[in-house]
Structures are given as structure tokens and as C-alpha cells.
Image (cartoon, helix red, strand yellow):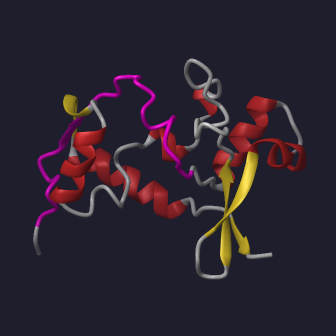
Amino acid sequence: MNEPFYAEGLHFSCQRCSLCCRHDPGVVRLSERDLASLIEWAGLSRERFIERYCRWVDRGDGTENLCLLEKKNYDCVFWDQGCTAYEARPFQCSSYPFWPSLLRDEDWWAANAADCPGVNKGKLHDRAEIESFLERRKREPYIMRKKV
């Protein structure tokens, strides 16, 4: 069995540049745990929070994921000179860049390094930590419904 390219760990330290939160279209999918944390942070009912801060995004397979809204300029709905919901931010945000899509292989990781100033810098995240992010992602599926 081949070792993953990150077997010796990967360096990453968030530079708080907000490039991953702003300016470009993106999708922040929510799990039930994410939603519960954000609802508690906002002090709103589930229905009111979804109505105010979320949208359903087509997955292309007849289903939709519950996702955070974006502003007209593509900033995250919670971005205002930084993340206003930082302590309750979704796992997708707090686990970046240790996403399955970016850990597919070294080429994907390198492509992300060109876009994010924190990739390949700072703290070494070991294989166990990286794989714990991947495992949590599997344990906490995104909220999904049949397309309406």
C-alpha cells in the first residue's frame, strides 16, 4: 500500500488573509453539528437561522446541500473585517486546507499552495492530525435534501 503524500505531515499556518472567505464564489456546506453551533452563536431558531443565513445549493444529482449565503461581492455572509462567527465557524472553515479534495494528491495540494499564503508555511501538521480532519468530515455529513 502506498503512503499518502502527506505521510510526513504538511505545513500550514493561517495567515488570516481571508482569501478563502472573500471575493470569489464559494460554497460552505453545513453539517448538523455546524448548524447547531451557528444557531447557538446567533441565538436564533433553526428556521430563522436558515432563512437569514443559508441557501440550498444544487449538487447536480437531484439533491441539495444546506450552505451559508454569500454577499453580492462573494464574501461569506459572516465576513466583516474578519469572521464574525469565528468561534462557531463551520468545520469546513476550521479544517482548511485539510480537505479530502485538496489531499487527493500532491498536485492538488501544490495548486492550493499557489492560492493560499499559509500553505507550506508554519506549523507542521502530522499525518494523524490530518487524518483526524478527514475522519471527522466522514462522521459529519453535510445536510442534504432532495431538490425541490
Magenta-colored span: 3-27
Question: Is residue 59 positioned above or below 33 on the image?
Answer: below
Quarter of the view holding residue 129: top left
Q: Could you say where residue 106 lies in the image, as x and y percent from the top left?
A: 16, 57
Which residue is depicted at the point 23% across and 50% down?
111
Of residue 53 and residue 37, the one placed in the foreground of this image is 53
For the C terminus, the quadrant is bottom right
Which residue is depicted at the point 47% across and 57% down?
137
> Is 3 on the left or on the right of 96, as rendered?
left
User: What's the magenta bit mostly, secondary-structure-wise?
Assistant: loop
State how many labels appear.
0
Of residue 78 and residue 100, the one placed in the foreground of this image is 78
Quarter of the view holding residue 1: bottom left
Question: Is residue 59 positioned above or below 37 on the image?
Answer: below
Q: Could you say where residue 123 lies in the image, as x and y percent from the top left?
A: 23, 28
Quarter of the view holding residue 115: top left
Which residue is depicted at the point 43% across and 43% down?
95
Taking the magenta stretch, the answer to whether it contains residue 119 is no
Question: Is residue 2 positioned above or below 140 on the image?
Answer: below
Of residue 130 and residue 54, the one placed in the foreground of this image is 54
Q: Could you say where residue 58 lies in the image, as x and y percent from the top left?
A: 64, 69
Which residue is depicted at the point 65% across and 43% down?
70
